[in-house]
């Protein structure tokens, strides 16, 4: 996280890519560590000294959009293999809920005078309006 917060822009971008590979693999598969990571991503995106806010917001979009585990669990339920997907949909639900909980930070960024921050923040807000948190089972 320090490389994202305090390093030069190129190093920060690489760090965001590395972190994205860990918390949103392939850009659409979240893991157990994703939801606990989201508040840190939001804090970094809202910090005035962070240079790669657009990349952080793009990662938050990918996390919010993902429904891979829910889709896999639904397909497995039809085939009688739902026991194989007990935890993963919860990870996904928690990750999406964490992004939604960060709405105040994202709204502040959307109001920024800097278009490189405001545009991706507004895009994430639109996505959040379209993709509600998962319902609890």
Image (cartoon, rainbow, N blue to C red):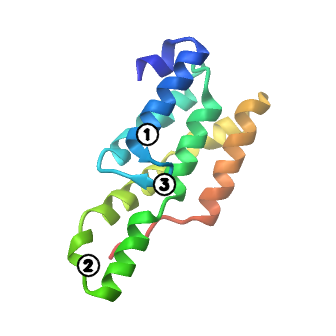
Measured as percent of width and height from the top left, residue 5 is found at 49, 19
Name the secondary structure under disc 3.
loop
First along the sequence among labels 1 and 3: 1
Q: Distance between the residues labelled 1 and 2?
A: 26 Å
| Tag 1 and tag 2, C-beta contact below 8 Å | no
For the view shown, which residue lies furthest in the left direction? 83
User: Residue 49: in sight, yes or no?
Assistant: no
Along the line of sight, which residue is nearer the eye, 106 or 11? 11
Assign the N terminus to one quadrant of the image: top left
Residue underneath mark 3:
28
Measured as percent of width and height from the top left, residue 60 is found at 53, 45
| Tag 2 and tag 3, C-beta contact below 8 Å | no
Q: How far apart are marks 2 and 3 (CA)?
A: 20 Å
First along the sequence among labels 1 and 2: 1
Measured as percent of width and height from the top left, residue 101 is found at 47, 50
Which residue is at 48% across, 54% downward? 28
Name the secondary structure under disc 1.
helix
Mark linked to residue 110? none
- Residue count near mark 2 (Cα–Cα under 10 Å), binned few <14, some 14–19, many ≥20: some
- Residue count near mark 1 (Cα–Cα under 10 Å), binned few <14, some 14–19, many ≥20: some
Which residue is at 42% across, 54% downward? 29
Name the secondary structure under disc 2.
helix
Note whether 55 is above or below 127 in the view shown.
above
| Tag 1 and tag 3, C-beta contact below 8 Å | no
User: Residue 64: in sight, yes or no?
Assistant: yes
Assign the C terminus to one quadrant of the image: bottom left
Residue underneath mark 2:
82
Compared across the picture, whether 73 is left or right of 45 comes to: left
Residue underneath mark 1:
21
Q: How far apart are marks 1 and 3 (CA)?
A: 10 Å
Q: How many labels does the image show?
A: 3
Residue 56 falls in image quadrant: top right
């Amino acid at each position: 996280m320090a490389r994202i917060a305090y390093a030069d822009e190129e190093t920060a971008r690489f760090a965001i890519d590395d972190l994205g590979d860990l918390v949103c693999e392939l850009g659409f598969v979240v893991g157990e560590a994703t939801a606990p990571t989201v508040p840190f991503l939001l804090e970094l995106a809202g910090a005035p000294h962070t240079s790669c806010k657009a990349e952080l917001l793009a990662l938050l979009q990918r996390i919010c959009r993902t429904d891979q585990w829910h889709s896999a669990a639904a397909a497995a339920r039809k085939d009688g293999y739902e026991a194989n997907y007990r935890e993963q949909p919860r990870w996904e639900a928690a990750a999406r809920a964490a992004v939604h909980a960060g709405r105040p930070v994202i709204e502040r960024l959307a109001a920024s005078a800097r278009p490189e921050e405001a545009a991706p923040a507004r895009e994430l807000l639109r996505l959040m309006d379209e993709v509600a948190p998962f319902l609890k089972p």
